[in-house]
Image: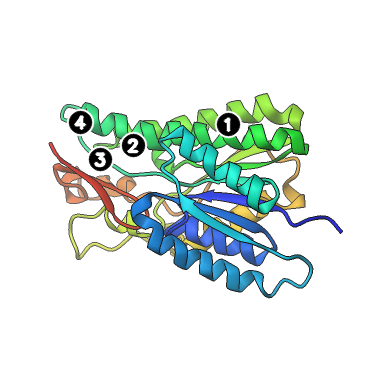
């Protein structure tokens, strides 16, 4: 009998990361969950949920590990991967989900905001990809998945820095796919528009405004993204690599033309949020 596969998920305390963790646990994975230190209580709750789901698996003795991981610090990412290897038996899947959000006009954006977005959204993905690949190569391969965004597909007012950071994930993903294909490692990313998470809700400055409903008339849920990830790590996706998979619901920033006023959707302060809480705030 083959041992259970092991998945590492960053930013797993809430939202998309939580949904992915629960999905993979229910599909028979041992999981290693990481999130920033201030989210450890929420992360423990997710870990407990994963353990309950894993109990229904009669084939393998599945395990769950969780710990603090700020992806902008490479040593913490490496420690999370090492914990997966040492305590769970290895790493077969890396989901580099952790990210933060921020918005400001280009004429007003601070170096501090720009650097923080890149530290988490770009360097954090690079560190996660690299740590995973180093552990996967001796095992004969694996699946790596990153978090991009529709915001990285084209320019939008107030989103130069955030969009650039998510566009960089696209480049990192496709480069890694080309470099690591010879090691039997596939590398893909999901790029949703508006998703029903705290991060998306914090994007709005008017309480009366709801998340947009376009195209399919359904807002994307975290579980929708988790379903995509479950496919990308399945045997059916063994030859899929270098793709950036978009979800159909547009990002709310795409709607600014409906009123002709960008500030209908965004005000002139900067808000950076994790999936579960406001992490940083800068007045500009």
Q: Mark 4 or mark 2: which comes first in sequence?
A: 4
Crowding around mark 3 (Cα neighbors within 10 Å: few <14, some 14 to 19, many 20+) is many
Is disc 2 placed on a helix, strand or loop? Answer: helix
Q: Mark 3 or mark 1: which comes first in sequence?
A: 3
Name the image quarter holding residue 227: bottom right
Q: Which residue is drawn at 44% across and 54% down?
A: 249
What colouring style does the render use?
rainbow
Is disc 4 placed on a helix, strand or loop? Answer: loop
Mark seen at residue 103: 3
Viewer-closest of 59 and 207: 59
Residue 15 horizontal side relative to residue 22, left or right: left
Instruction: State the image coordinates of residue 181 (x, y, percent, origin top left).
Output: 72, 30
Mark seen at residue 109: 4
Instruction: State the image coordinates of residue 5 (x, y, percent, origin top left).
Output: 72, 53
Q: Mark 2 or mark 1: which comes first in sequence?
A: 1
Is 122 drawn above or below residue 189 in the view shown? above
Q: Mark 4 or mark 1: which comes first in sequence?
A: 4
Residue 119 horizontal side relative to residue 282, left or right: right
Alpha-carbon distance for marks 4 and 3? 8 Å
Viewer-closest of 250 and 274: 274
Alpha-carbon distance for marks 4 and 1? 30 Å
Is disc 1 placed on a helix, strand or loop? Answer: helix
State the residue position of label 2.
162
Q: Nearer the viewer, mark 3 or mark 1?
A: 1
Name the image quarter holding residue 29: bottom right
Q: Residue at x 79, y 68 (%)?
A: 59
Q: Which residue is drawn at 44% across and 45% down?
A: 69
């Amino acid at each position: 009998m083959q041992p259970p596969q092991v998945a590492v998920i960053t930013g797993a305390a809430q939202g998309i990361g939580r949904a992915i963790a629960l999905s993979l646990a229910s599909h028979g994975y041992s999981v290693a969950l990481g999130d920033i230190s201030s989210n450890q209580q929420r992360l423990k709750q997710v870990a407990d949920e994963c353990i309950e789901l894993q109990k229904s698996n009669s084939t393998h003795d599945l395990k769950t590990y969780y710990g603090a991981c700020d992806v902008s610090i490479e040593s913490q990412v490496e420690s999370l991967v090492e914990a997966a290897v040492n305590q769970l038996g290895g790493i077969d899947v890396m989901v580099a989900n952790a990210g933060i959000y921020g918005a400001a006009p280009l004429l007003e954006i601070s170096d501090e905001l720009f650097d923080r977005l890149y530290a988490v959204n770009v360097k954090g993905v690079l560190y996660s990809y690299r740590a995973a690949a180093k552990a996967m190569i001796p095992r004969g391969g694996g699946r790596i998945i990153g978090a991009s965004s529709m915001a990285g597909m084209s320019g939008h007012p107030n989103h130069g820095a955030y969009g650039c950071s998510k566009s960089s994930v696209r480049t990192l993903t496709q480069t890694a796919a080309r470099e690591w294909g010879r090691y039997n490692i596939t590398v893909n990313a999901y790029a949703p528009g508006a998703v029903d998470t705290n991060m998306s809700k914090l994007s709005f400055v008017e309480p009366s405004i709801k998340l947009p409903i376009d195209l399919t008339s359904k807002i994307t849920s975290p579980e929708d993204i988790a379903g995509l990830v479950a496919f990308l790590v399945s045997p059916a996706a063994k030859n899929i690599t270098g793709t950036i998979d978009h979800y159909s619901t547009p990002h709310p920033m795409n709607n600014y033309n409906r009123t002709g006023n960008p500030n209908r959707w965004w005000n002139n302060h900067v808000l950076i949020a994790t999936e579960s809480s406001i992490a940083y705030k800068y007045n500009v």
